[in-house]
Image (spheres, rainbow, N blue to C red):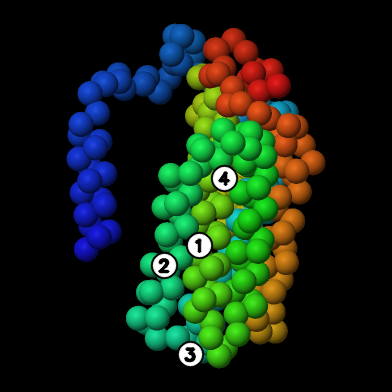
Amino acid sequence: MFDAISYGLSALFVVLIRRREPAPDPHVDEHGRRRGNLLSEVRDGLRYVLGSPYLRAIAACTGTANLFSNLAFATLIVYAVRDLGLSAVEIGIVFGLGNIGAIIGAFTADRLRRALGLGHAIVLSAALGGPGVLLVALAPAASPIPFLVASGFLIGFSNVVYNINQVSFRQAITPLPMQGRMNATMRFIVWGTIPLGQILGGAIATAFSIPAALWIGGIGAFLAVLPVLFSPVRSLVDMPTPADEGSTGVEAAA
């Protein structure tokens, strides 16, 4: 019911948007220049993302986190039922309580950025994902619910704080004409690891055991923070002003 209400509110807010944007011409850009073919636009996006130390680090961080978290959680429901003996109601309660972390993250993401600085907020939120995933592997069969709720809380909180800040930063440093190619490239990289993680998680769980997949995913998730920790992202303080159309976007973040 609540899910249906949220979709209804989302539709209402979209309808209330007053700004009307013209439909883009698929053959020319906003300056009237003829667009290149798909392959050239893919190359442009890859060149832009991989050429930026900021975007490159964020892509590596997010892709690594998605890989190992999906490796760990590919068989989570099976593990919760078979190994931990949870009922459908208990699993629902775990997810419901754990998702409170995402709500708190949405309300505190900008406050954390102002208090810690942009780079530190990104690094800290990325670092919380590893402990969140590992808590599932550490959950004792006798009383797993507190561990699972804490895991969901940490993961939800860290994901929302991380994504609000890093996505806003990506958009701020990228000139408007490059926005679509930048986002398409980032999505390809960071979402491309999701099915890989799920396949690996299922394969490890089948060949060895579900706890083995959980431990590998939990330990591997700690690696996700390293690309942003050892990159210029860590030194960012303020959210940069949006890049103009002629800039590369990288200078705006320095």
Mark 4 vs 1, N-terminal side: 1
Question: What residue do we see at 56% from left, 75% from top?
Answer: 147
Residue drawn at x 62%, y 71% is 135
Per the rendering, the mark at residue 162 is: 4
Say if mark 4 contacts mark 2, CB within 8 Å.
no
**Is residue 219 visible in the rendered structure shown here?**
yes
- Determine whether the residue tagged by mark 4 lies in a helix, strand or loop: helix
Look at the picture and state if 158 lies above or below 99.
above
Q: How far apart are the alpha carbons under marks 3 and 4? A: 33 Å
In this view, the mark in front (1 or 3): 1
Amino acid on which the number 4 mark rests in the picture: Tyr
Q: Are marks 1 and 3 in contact (CB under 8 Å)?
A: no
State how far apart marks 1 and 3 are (Cα).
21 Å
Q: List x then y, in percent, for residue 54.
A: 69, 32
| Label drawn at residue 33 | none
**Numbered circle sitting on residue 153:** 1
Question: Quick check: marks 4 and 1 in contact, CB under 8 Å?
Answer: no
Which quarter of the image is occupied by the N terminus?
bottom left
Residue situated in front as seen by the camera: 52 or 33: 52
- On the image, numbered disc 3 is attached to which residue? 85
Rendered image: mark on residue 97: 2
Amino acid type at mark 2? Leu
Mark found first going from the N terminus, 3 or 2:
3
- Mark 3 Cα-neighbour bin, 10 Å: few <14, some 14–19, many ≥20: some
CA–CA distance in space, label 1 to label 2: 7 Å
Q: Amino acid at mark 1?
A: Phe
Q: Secondary structure at mark 2?
A: helix
Query: On the rendered structure, is 107 left or right of 66?
Result: left
Mark 3 lies on a secondary structure that is loop
The answer to whether the residues at label 1 and label 2 have Cβ atoms under 8 Å apart is yes
